Image (tube, rainbow, N blue to C red):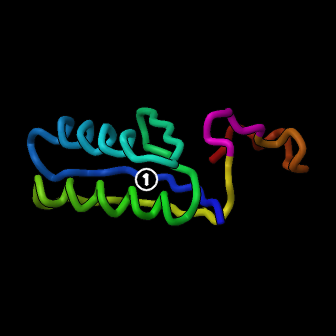
């Protein structure tokens, strides 16, 4: 089974940017997963075991380096194309007048 995960790491430390960068660099070194990072979050996709293993290893490393750390994650049991912009409303039957509303 392939999954997609969106996550954000929040190290509760004064030098939090370095800890976030380390987490992302470590994730990028993990085999068998695809990663896209932007200003808001990191998306990961791949085989369930590869994704979960990578997240577990990298989260453990982050939590061993700094305390406390918050990891917020959303898991989807679908293989989303995280490298492409979504086409919200194009074919979903959504009301075009509500496209820009959250």
Residue 11 position, x and y percent, is 20, 51
Residue 23 position, x and y percent, is 28, 45
| Towards the viewer: 29 or 19 | 29
**Residue appearing at x 51%, y 47% in the figure:** 33
Locate residue 67 relative to residue 3 in the image: left or right: left
**Residue 88 occupies which quadrant of the picture?**
top right
Query: Could you classify mark 1 by the number of other residues whose Cα lies within 10 Å: few (under 14), some (14-19), or many (20 or more)?
Result: some
Tell whether position 16 is magenta.
Answer: no
**Residue appearing at x 30%, y 59% in the figure:** 57
Tell whether position 82 is magenta.
Answer: yes
Furthest residue in direction front, as rendered: 31
Query: Start and end of the magenta stretch?
Result: 81-87
- Against 82, residue 50 (above or below) is below
**Residue appearing at x 51%, y 48% in the figure:** 32
| Towards the viewer: 94 or 52 | 52
Residue at the spot of label 1: 7
**Residue 60 occupies which quadrant of the picture?**
bottom left
**Residue appearing at x 65%, y 66% in the figure:** 1
| Towards the viewer: 18 or 39 | 18
Residue 69 position, x and y percent, is 20, 58
């Amino acid at each position: 089974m392939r999954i997609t995960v969106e996550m954000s790491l929040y190290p509760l430390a004064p030098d939090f940017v370095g800890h976030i960068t380390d987490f992302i660099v470590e994730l990028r070194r993990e085999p068998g997963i695809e990663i896209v990072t932007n200003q808001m979050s990191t998306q990961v996709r791949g085989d369930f075991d590869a994704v979960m293993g990578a997240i577990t290893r990298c989260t453990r490393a982050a939590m061993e380096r700094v305390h406390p750390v918050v990891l917020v994650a959303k898991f989807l049991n679908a293989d989303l194309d995280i490298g492409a912009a979504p086409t919200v409303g194009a074919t979903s039957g959504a009301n075009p007048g509500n496209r820009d509303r959250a």
